[in-house]
Amino acid sequence: MNRKRNDYPVSPMADTIRAGDCGVLPRELPAGSVDLVFTSPPYFNAKSYSTYASYESYLASMRRVIRLCRRVLSEGRFFVLNSLPILIARRNLGESSRRLAIPFDLHRLVTEEGFDFIDDIIWRKPEGAGWSSGRGRRFARDRNPLQYKAVPVTEYIMVYRKTTDKLIDWHLRHHPDREMVRRSRIPDGYEKTNVWDIPPASDPRHPAVFPLELAEKIVRYYSFIGDVVLDPFAGTGTVGLAAALLARRYVLFDAKPEYVAAARERIRAVVKIDRDDFPPHPV
């Protein structure tokens, strides 16, 4: 890790996309080489791209990734997590469906692994977006008491900061490039509350994508120009694309080679393509 003025960490990382185990690849990154982590982990077994033996094994896997992200994240920088409760469908008419509060279980893991809770942001989608989940349809038809179920139109964006004794202002005051700090200032039109109204996105190549607008807001609000942004569950590369468009560097991992190929294709259309290997770094 290179260091400049006042011991401020400056990462040597170059734009990188890799296919492989998201619980292993972050180990290859230098400690403290990332300035922001923004990711949306698998929703347990709710989507076709993930299969876990049990919910407990899913949480154990998420804990390993969270721990690795903490190691590679620079001191006092932000870890931002997009997740939502998911519905486990009933297997037969004699059983009830089950809902898992993934954001709250992940919150416990993140805070246990050395992060401070900073903010809870609600991503609110248009009302029609929630009916595809199936919730609320029976009540809309029958209107019986006890059967009410709200149609879900929100997801959680949970914001954490790697535990440190430094105030946030430390990064503003000690950044080695004052012009970069000035250029990173947030323009008018920023989100003033913790409820963000953003339409959902879709991509035929991936069953769960979030919109570029959401990724751009997170990257802009929680990093400087030139910073390194990591997404260990990159999918088709929305976080990397947002980083590239906003003059940040990106490090993207995903277990599926076809998603990595899609991410490369998306980013190649905008910027010079990434590296497949990690650059040399000081020991």
Image (cartoon, rainbow, N blue to C red):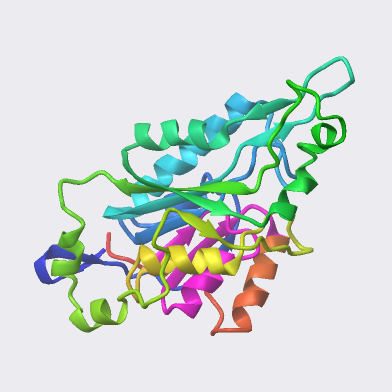
Which portion, as a residue range, is magenta?
228-257
In percent of width and height, residue 11 lies at: 31, 67
How many labels were placed on the picture? 0
16 or 97, nearer to the observer: 97
In percent of width and height, residue 98 lies at: 71, 25
* Residue shown at 64% from the left, 69% from the top: 263
* Residue shown at 60% from the left, 53% from the top: 20
In the image, 85: left or right of 280?
right
Answer with the quarter of the image where residue 83 lies.
top right
* Residue shown at 13% from the left, 68% from the top: 173
* Residue shown at 41% from the left, 38% from the top: 110
Classify the position of the N terminus by image quarter.
bottom left
Q: Is residue 64 above or below residue 203?
A: above
Q: Is residue 118 above or below residue 222?
A: above
In percent of width and height, residue 79 lies at: 39, 51
Q: Residue furthest left?
A: 6
104 or 139, nearer to the observer: 139
Classify the position of the C terminus by image quarter.
bottom left
